[in-house]
Image (cartoon, rainbow, N blue to C red):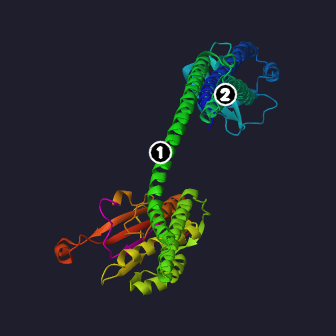
Amino acid sequence: MRLSTRLLLPLLAAITAVMAVFAWWAQKRRESTMLAEARRETEAFATAFGVALEGAFRHSDPEQVQELVDRLSQEPSVYAVLVYDTLGVVLFASRSLPLLDAPPLGLVRQALATDGRVSLERKIWDEEVYSVLRPFRGEDGAVVGVYEVAQPLVPIRAEVARTRQRFLLNTFVLLVAVAGLTSWLVRRLVSRPLERFSRAVESLGSGDLSHRIQEELSTGELAEVARQLNRMADRLEAARKELLAESEERVALERRLQASERLAAVGNLAARLAHEIAAPLHVIRGRADLLLKGDRGPEDRARQLRIIVEQIDRITVIVRNLLSFARRPEPRIQRVDLAALLTSVLEFLEPELRRAGIELEWNSEPAPMVEGDPDLLFQVFTNLLLNAVQAMEEQDGGRRLLAVHLENDPLSPPGEKARWVRVRVEDTGPGIPEELLPSIFEPFVTTKRGAAGTGLGLAVAKAAVEQMGGVLVAENLPFPPETVGREGRKWRGARFSVVLKAAKGGGELG
């Protein structure tokens, strides 16, 4: 409900109540005044008629009495005039009045008994009247009868009704005028300034700190509120300018810091790359020197050339993996069927698994759809599975690879649809050396012996997963305490967990 309406309704209710009470009081007072005037007028007619009636009775002239009755009856404010004897029998009556079927004997006796006046409201032939009854005397001074002068109350009632209608009409007109005036004042002095305040607050909230309120359009306390709001906007705008300046300075500092970090990273990467390439180059140089001596047989020369080619291939792989890590192509995010993708990866690596004699266990139930790049995910899971296979190749017996892809991840609230899907790749290899575990995803860090690995596969996989908004975590799986001594090694294998975003509408986790 608008503020103007909330202010107007109580005010109109109060005014209506006051006007209603005043109208009721004024109407009652008007009715009382009119009735009092009618009574005084009737009593005045009765007094004058009584004097004339006693004079006519002293002269014993019935025609004069009837003439008096008819003359008084012609008055607009007189309904009827009646003359009774002491027994209540009507002696004279207005000619316009039908004969009474039941003379008011009780009233006549009351007037005779009190020897005074009787005033009351009653009905004469279903007409409400105000009657005044008085006794009159004859020549000897004795009471010889009672006369009644009646004034109709219908005109008075009608005038009271008209007065009531006028009061109601005046009250309605006054209420309409007050409502219109109050509404105009509230809209001009309250609603419009508040609307300007609301627009100002909305503009400030949306970031437009240049918006100001015209103080001359407000008055009183609202003008002070406008001034305070404008001062607040000035302070906010000044604070934003300072913050922007500090932010620009911070961004410039961060850019310089990032440039320094990139240079340091490039230097570190160049040092590692030089170290990785130096070994095969030394081998190539040594083999080439042997070939230059010319005292080698054909078979030995062929063996030396094969070694040179292998080292060149190794350098090529190092450079290719380094380029893949550095370029990081933008992923094409789409809905990916995780179960189908893992099935294709396992089919691709099936010959390698069979050659290494590895037993595969995995959950092939339907998995939720995830958000990711299918090509990058294929590369990630291929690298992880190949690393697990290579970690178990030097192990005698117990080669088992476990891939679980349908699992509630701790990042997904229980009881809700999956927000994250976790794929676990576990092996029964020797695990990751503790000293390498914190840096296992850094470039050129590898657990493989000799020239078997370049140390870039896990770095490429982690970068790809993070580009898709996921997480890649590595950990060792310890033996139960009671079996550590029997196995002779500390870890029973390694686990790599890939956490990916579940696609919207991708189903619920099991």
Q: Is residue 271 magenta?
A: no
Q: Is residue 419 magenta?
A: yes
**Which mark, by number, is residue 200?**
none
Q: Is residue 192 visible?
A: yes
Residue matched to label 1: 264
Identify which residue, 91 or 94, lies in the foreground.
94
Residue occupying the point 82% across, 20% down? 71
Q: Earlier in the sequence, mark 2 or mark 1?
A: 2
Instruction: Say which element carries label 1.
Output: helix
Residues under numbered marks 2 and 1 in contact, where contact means CB atoms less than 8 Å apart: no
Estimate how packed mark 1 is, as few (under 14), some (14 to 19) or many (20 or more) residues with alpha carbons within 10 Å: few
Q: Is residue 101 above or below residue 430?
A: above
Q: Is residue 280 above or below residue 248?
A: below
Identify which residue, 260 or 371, lies in the foreground.
260
Question: Alpha carbon of mark 2 to alpha carbon of mark 1: how far?
Answer: 56 Å
| Secondary structure, magenta segment, majority class | loop
Q: Position of residue 249 (x, y in %)?
A: 54, 31
Identify which residue, 423 or 436, lies in the foreground.
436
Hey, what amino acid is under mark 1?
Ala
Hey, what amino acid is under mark 2?
Arg
Q: Position of residue 10 (x, y in %)?
A: 59, 30
Estimate how packed mark 2 is, as few (under 14), some (14 to 19) or many (20 or more) residues with alpha carbons within 10 Å: some
Instruction: Say which element carries label 2.
Output: helix
Magenta residue span: 417-436
Residue 306 is left or right of residue 214, and the answer is left
Residue matched to label 2: 196
Q: Position of residue 504 (x, y in %)?
A: 56, 65
Q: Is residue 366 visible?
A: no
Identify which residue, 510 or 254, lies in the foreground.
254
